[in-house]
Image (cartoon, rainbow, N blue to C red):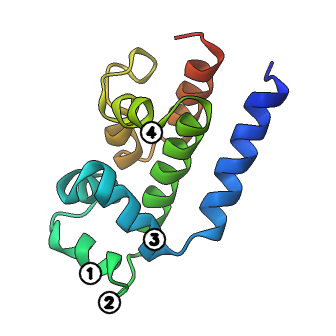
Amino acid sequence: MQTQRELAAEVRAHRDTAEQTTAYVARFLQDNFGRRVTALVAGIEDPKQVGKWCKADNAPRIDSELRLRTAYQVFKLIENGENAHVARAWMIGMNPQLEDDAPVQAIADDRFKDVMAAARSYLQGDL
């Protein structure tokens, strides 16, 4: 069961994700993970496309935007519960709840609910 603090962190992360432009989300992920990992998360092959999204030169397809926003929301959830350093390390590290895949890879594979469940477990101290 979630504590009030955990629930508040989750609501803040969700609200923040909904309020940001796609360009902002892409820029945030690029700043924290680099273009190649952001492209991986989005499910695209050309990392240069991420730079175009950051400048709002064009917008990603809806499936890519969904992955970007999911990665952003999970990052913000972990950051709200811990800090940005922990959030970045958690997102790119192997995770036993995700069959040892990194959360960024699981998001790229459209395993959104699995990643969110793993993030919640982490914040609750289960893993």
Q: Nearer the N terminus, badge 4 or badge 1? A: 1
Camera-nearest label, 3 or 2: 3
Q: Nearer the N terminus, badge 1 or badge 2? A: 1
User: Separation of disc 3 and disc 2 at Cα?
Assistant: 12 Å
Q: Nearer the N terminus, badge 3 or badge 2? A: 3
- Do labels 1 and 2 touch, CB within 8 Å? yes
Q: Which of 125 and 70 is in front in this view?
A: 125
Side of 126 where 64 appears, left or right: left
Identify the residue shown where x is 78% and y is 39%: 8
Identify the residue shown where x is 40% and y is 76%: 61
The amino acid beneath tag 4 is Ala
User: Separation of disc 1 and disc 2 at Cα?
Assistant: 5 Å
Q: Nearer the N terminus, badge 4 or badge 2? A: 2
Which quarter of the rendering shows the N terminus? top right
- Do labels 4 and 2 touch, CB within 8 Å? no
Where on the picture, by quarter, is residue 105?
top left
- Do labels 4 and 3 touch, CB within 8 Å? no
Camera-nearest label, 4 or 2: 4
Labelled disc at residue 24:
3
